[in-house]
Amino acid sequence: MTTATYTEAGRGGTTAALLTEILAVTGRRLRHLRRAPGRVIGVALSPLVSMVMLGYLFRDAIRLPAGGSYGEYVFAGGAVQVALACVGPTAVSVAMDIRGGLVDRFRSLPISRSAVLAGHTLADWLVGMLGLAVVTGAGLLLGWRTRTGLLPTLAAFGLIALFVYVMLWVGVLLATTLRTVETISVVTPFIVVVLPFLSNAFLAPQSMPAAVRPLAEWNPLSAVIAACRDLWGNPAATGGSFPAEHPVAVAAVTLAALLAVCSAVSLRRYRTAGS
């Protein structure tokens, strides 16, 4: 029997079968990650460095145009940076699966291709949530506090959780497009280090040079961070740009578009990977 006889929905062509396959792949991935506990530290390390170096050491040296605590301002940038730190490990892992022939082995099994990637991203998302918990704990120790109620606070963390999942699909897209670990290792530091500095993560866009300001204002990262600051009641970057005035709406539309495009393209490329 060939894989052509299998439907994309799974063995029985049902949603239940697809969910079973996703959970099976998730369990396999989590068992692999259990042997590498340093993965959580790797995801949380860059955000922790940003919060400590900028939010704590330089909190009295950097002034916000609209006033407020710089330590609280930086926390949202550090929390969202967790999602960026997840891109590289996921991209490398998927690329290694493709190079190592795992895709060919999956082709011989009655399992849908979408279940493989969905299970992989779900397991990595759980690791990202652990990293977010570590960063949140560190933020509380460094003085971050939410100034709103329980529901807005949870909504902001829910937005970050969604952003983490979207960025995992960005990682899968990088893996299925570049396919080599060496190339991925060159690209991903740009995402983790450079993108936050081209957003409102650490500095208000209005304090940036005029040539860079529009890029920072329309960076999708800026909308997610600004939405979290609004929901937490933390100091926010002021400005007259549309994303600054409507961060929640811009973040929701941007993340939905990114997830739809990245998942669709990744699945199409993954079906032909290794062939």
Image (tube, rainbow, N blue to C red):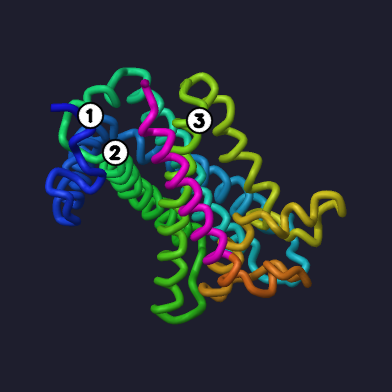
In x, y percent, where is residue 270? 38, 33
Q: Which residues are magenta?
A: 251-275
Tell me: residue 18, above or below residue 171.
Answer: below
Q: Nearer the viewer, residue 160 or 63?
A: 160
Task: Count the numbered circles shown.
Answer: 3
Task: Specify which label sits upstream in the sequence, 3 or 1.
Answer: 1
Which amino acid is tagged 1?
Phe
Q: Residues within 10 Å of mark 2 (few under 14, many from 20)?
A: many
Residue drawn at 49 percent across, 72 percent down:
146
| Quadrant position of the C terminus in the picture | top left
- Disc 3 is placed on an element classified as helix
Majority secondary structure in the magenta region: helix
- Disc 2 is placed on an element classified as helix
Q: Residues within 10 Å of mark 3 (few under 14, many from 20)?
A: some
Farthest bottom residue in view: 149
Whether residue 274 is in magenta: the answer is yes
| Quadrant position of the N terminus in the picture | top left
- Tag shown at residue 113: 2
97 lies left or right of 24: right
Instruction: Give the Cα distance between marks 2 and 1.
Output: 8 Å
Which amino acid is tagged 2?
Arg
Residue drawn at 16 percent across, 31 percent down:
109
Task: Please name the residue that numbered disc 1 is placed on.
Answer: 106
74 lies left or right of 274: right
Disc 3 and disc 2 in contact, CB within 8 angstroms: no
Task: Please name the residue that numbered disc 3 is placed on.
Answer: 177
| Residue 234 occupies quadrant | bottom right
Residue drawn at 42 percent across, 28 percent down:
92
Q: Nearer the viewer, residue 56 or 148?
A: 148
In x, y percent, where is residue 156? 47, 68
Q: Residues within 10 Å of mark 1 (few under 14, many from 20)?
A: some
Tell me: residue 109, above or below residue 244.
Answer: above
